[in-house]
Image (cartoon, helix red, strand yellow):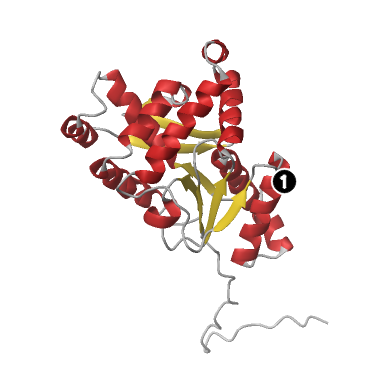
Amino acid sequence: MNTETIHDPSQPVPPPAARPVILSPIIAIDGPAGAGKSTVARHLARHFGLLNLETGAMYRAFALKALSANLSLQDIPALVELSHRTSISLVPTDAGNLVFLDGADVTSQLREPAVTDGASRVSVYPQIRAWMVALQQELGAQGGVVMEGRDIGTVVFPHADVKIFLDAAPEVRGLRRYEQLGQLDPETAAEVQPEEVVRELRARDDRDRNRADSPLKAAEDAVLLDSTKLTLEEVVAQAEAIVTEKLGWSPAQESDRGC
């Protein structure tokens, strides 16, 4: 017997069943250089089906442009003027972000030592940071992103749904950065010693933590994750657990969202 209910056209159409609310969270990952922010952010984005936006790459792209123009990184007016005619965009891919500077893909150039050092130097200027923060807020305005940097949870998105401050001992972070350099640029890595990388990293820490505008620090409501004695797998597992707990996602929801 056919039990299908036929709608009477003289009666109002019943409302559709309520749809589940689709969360569009913002996950902020902050921490010093070499802490593993980019790696953890990429994994979380894939696992939870979110976009990964690496804001540090934006500073490196701007530093690359300034260095290519032979500008002094201490010439604030010239840097501010340069920012007014600079376009930076991030294109997320499965392998990571592609970074476009004025329409050109400069991703492969952004891990050069001079560029990473330059990024730390230009980032101390309030005018440059204000410009970058506005760009970053625009990129993440719709949510559904994992955004990593140094002031995401404190300045860029202080109301982020999840905040993680990822840290590690300077010696450990320096060795990680040295190994990363060896993978990306073996010739350059052969010309430097691990101790030199650690020394430069400490100098960068000092600049980042003590700059007057938006210094590197953990947000009051951030979860601290120290990776000094953890493997990458352990760090990623702990980060996943933090996000799951903060957002209240069940294992089934994680499976539905994960890539």
Q: Is residue 63 left or right of residue 25?
A: left
Q: Is residue 79 visible?
A: yes
Q: Residue at x 27, y 47 (%)?
A: 130
Could you classify mark 1 by the number of other residues whose Cα lies within 10 Å: few (under 14), some (14-19), or many (20 or more)? Answer: few
Task: Work out whether 229 lies above or below 70.
Answer: below
Q: Quadrant of the N terminus?
A: bottom right
Quick check: 21 above or below 140? Answer: below
Counting from the top left corner in percent of width and height, residue 35 is at: 56, 40
State whether residue 20 is above or below residue 89.
below
Picture coordinates of residue 20 (x, y %)? 59, 70
Comparing 202 with 19, the one in front is 202
The percent position of residue 56, horizontal first and vertical second, equals 43, 38
Q: Nearer the viewer, residue 195 or 248?
A: 195
Q: At 63% from the left edge and 68% from the top edge, which residue is drawn?
A: 248
As helix, strand or loop, the secondary structure at mark 1 comes to helix
Q: Nearer the viewer, residue 127 or 217?
A: 217
Q: Please report the residue visible at 49 percent of the width from the left and 27 percent of the height from the top.
A: 199
Residue 225 screen position, x and y as percent? 61, 51
Most distant residue in the right direction: 1
Q: Amino acid at mark 1?
A: Glu
Residue 65 located left or right of residue 84: right
Q: Left or right: where does residue 17 sit relative to residue 76?
A: right
According to the picture, the residue beneath numbered tag 1 turns out to be: 234
